[in-house]
Amino acid sequence: MAGSSGKSMVGRFGVHLAVLFFVALWTVPTLGILVSSLRDKDQIIASGWWTALTSSTRTEAGRLGTAADQVEKDGKFQIVGNLFEDGGSRQIVAFGTRSQEPTRYKAGEVADLGDGETLQVNEDGSYIYASPKAFEGERGRRVYYSASSPPKFTTQNYRTVLFSEGIGRSFLNSLTVTIPATVIPILIAAFAAYALAWMRFPGRALLIAVIIGLLVVPLQMSLIPLLKLYNGVGTFFGVPSKTYLGIWLAHTGFGLPFAIYLLRSYIAGLPREIMESARIDGASDFEIFVKIVLPLSFPVLASFAIFQFLWVWNDLLVAMVFLGTEADQIVLTAKLNALLGSRGGDWEILTTSAFVTIIVPLIVFFSLQRYFVRGLLAGSVKGG
Amino acid sequence: MAAQIFSAVLVVVIGVGGCVAYFWGANKLLDLVFPAHGVSGAAAVDNLRRQGLIRPWLFIGPAMLILVVYLIYPVIDTLWLSFHDRSGQNFIGLANYEWAFGDREFRNSILNNVLWLAVVPAACTFLGLIIAVLTDRIWWGTIAKSLIFLPLAISFVGASVIWKFIYEYKGEGQTQIGILNAIVTGLGGDPHVWISIPFWNNFFLMVILIWIQTGFAMVILSSALRGIPEETIEAAVIDGANPFQIFWKIMVPQIWGTIAVVWTTITILVLKVFDIVLTMTNGQWNSQVLANLMFDWMFRGGGDFGRGATIAIIIMIAVIPIMVWNIRQANKETGGH
């Protein structure tokens, strides 16, 4: 295929272009929340994240000074002031006096408002409102303007979600769930995998078939009975039914079939001669396992550890069933789901929280991609 | 908080230590009860045989215990519960199943699941295959693959937030901050609340899963493509086949087995899809699927275990053909081993 594609420059260019298109399609969504999480929260709702590097424009309303502010000058009455009370770095692009035409006049232009009244609003927000007659009334005149603000990036969103939205605490909860739920199944599965690969006993073939069958059993099948069981155990012993121990064991149970399957096919492929020569030297099964099989199986153990870590970290369903929703137990995914409900349109909170939840998997993924891919291939390329 | 970190560390230590202690101790005990050394020849042989009978069960014992408690018993119990009422106490025969097939929401879920099953595995496999073939031919293919593979590490909830932001809707005339509506209005169309358009919203949700899973299909298929013997392709080139013929007639037939594996793996995932629907629509606007409906019934009005279990059984029934196929395939492979 490589030879035939080299035929035309156009064809090769097309391939680059097509791949570029796919890469863009697959990365732009994530880029969107990363960029948004770093933007000022007012800018997020004022303009699309893809314009983050350009100034964003927003139409706002303000009031001019009141009659009390007027000064008489050359027989005319003037109110002078600034629309931006806070100063800042915003710039007026256009202004108007009617809500239907909020941007009728350009900044700096002198607008004729009729009856000899004029209004001039400059880029920096300063204005001169002049009239041949004295101004009256308590309230200042309403004006509309569109102001552009330069791109503004901030880490404020991260401080907000980590420390006042509870994401920081949830991050810790996620770690509390994930690490034991990754470590415990590895040991249990490794011993079982060794027995299924290298020890002879009746019922072995049946056990392997059962484990392959369990690989695809939907999690949904386990939820209700386990919820009942946990509630029963909780009532019986007078302990809470939603505990970290409960979810560690649940994740262990759900991860075991894949762990045993993955490890068994790897361990079964280790060279027979090594085992046999060790056995002749008088090593027991336990010694062979600990001194030979475990060290040799490091790559597949790493693969499984990454899988289990990602799966537990990213899990929502098991956490929602077996853990509480209080601050001391709610994990990142569940917290993010709750925020989607309670902070619906607050994109600065949502994008930042989402990025915090995906950053750990992304780091694990990028640093250990080799093991991850190896595990994927070993785990699914069967029957090929 | 410090207490939580401490207890987590403690549990890891106790858990791992406990596992190690069990495996080491059980082995030691076995060696002590049936000593193979320091006894007469005949007794030693006898004891070795006994050890050989017992030791495998020491090794797989903990795994079996956990599998029974967390998977095998629940499967049986769920089946049992599906014939009982909401409390799980009173036998009501097939009433839950009758309810299910008469229920509008349930039928809608089945329909949507079928739609998901028809679209997602096919789309992932097809896109994955195309991208695998294309990236194999350019120098920056590895980087491209990494980037397309990346969403696989993102949680469904995280992905849902990412895509909800893409589908974000602002009223007509306002600045659209969702990229999809920005593109649509940029091209002169009207903005829409995409995820609330019945029927079509299913596709907007599917896109999320396709976005996540295409990388998986791509990696597996890419490795299978590498395994194709060069000679078969060279022969086809010499015979004057064009790239499309090579792709469809030479490459695809040789990786048919892998395509089937990718397809079935994604099919199982689709049957269980829950997080995306829960976070995007929670089944509103006719976008309900079985897994989310089941979760809903588990807790709705204090929880209806009978109906929840029934929905789980329906999902299970859909998985069984794949399960049988997998076991057959594995048996064929191990054969004599």
Image: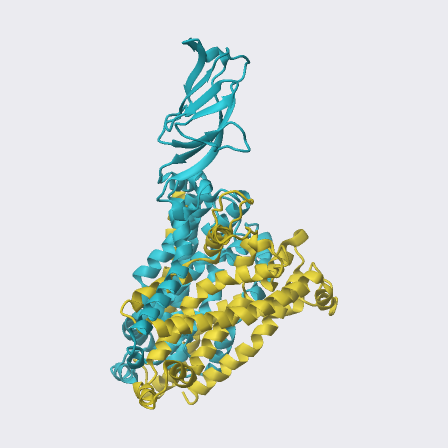
Chain colours: A cyan, B yellow
Task: Give the residue at x 40% y 67%.
Answer: B215
Task: Tell me the quadrant of the picture where the C terminus of chain A can be found.
Answer: bottom left
Asked whether residue B17 is in view, the answer is: yes
Q: Find residue B200 and report its image quarter.
A: bottom right
Task: Give the residue at x 49% y 15%.
Answer: A66
B63 on left or right of B98: left
> In the displayed structure, would residue A246 be above or below residue B235?
above
> In the displayed structure, would residue B95 be above or below residue A102?
below
A149 on left or right of B286: left
Where does residue A243 sit, x and y in percent of width and height? Answer: 50, 52
A213 on left or right of A149: right
Where does residue A87 sit, x and y in percent of width and height? Answer: 37, 26
Residues B287 and B292: in front is: B287
Task: Give the residue at x 30% y 60%.
Answer: A367
Residues B96 and B48: in front is: B96
Where does residue A43 sit, x and y in percent of width and height? Answer: 42, 39
Q: Find residue B294 and report its image quarter.
A: bottom right
Where does residue A218 sit, x and y in percent of width and height? Answer: 54, 68
User: What is the total number of numbered labels drawn onto the structure image?
Assistant: 0
Task: Tell me the quadrant of the picture where the N terminus of chain A can be found.
Answer: bottom left
Residues A44 and B188: in front is: B188
Residues A230 and A332: in front is: A332
A131 on left or right of B220: right
Task: Give the residue at x 43% y 67%.
Answer: B214
> In the displayed structure, would residue A281 be above or below residue B83?
below
Asked whether residue B61 is in view, the answer is: no
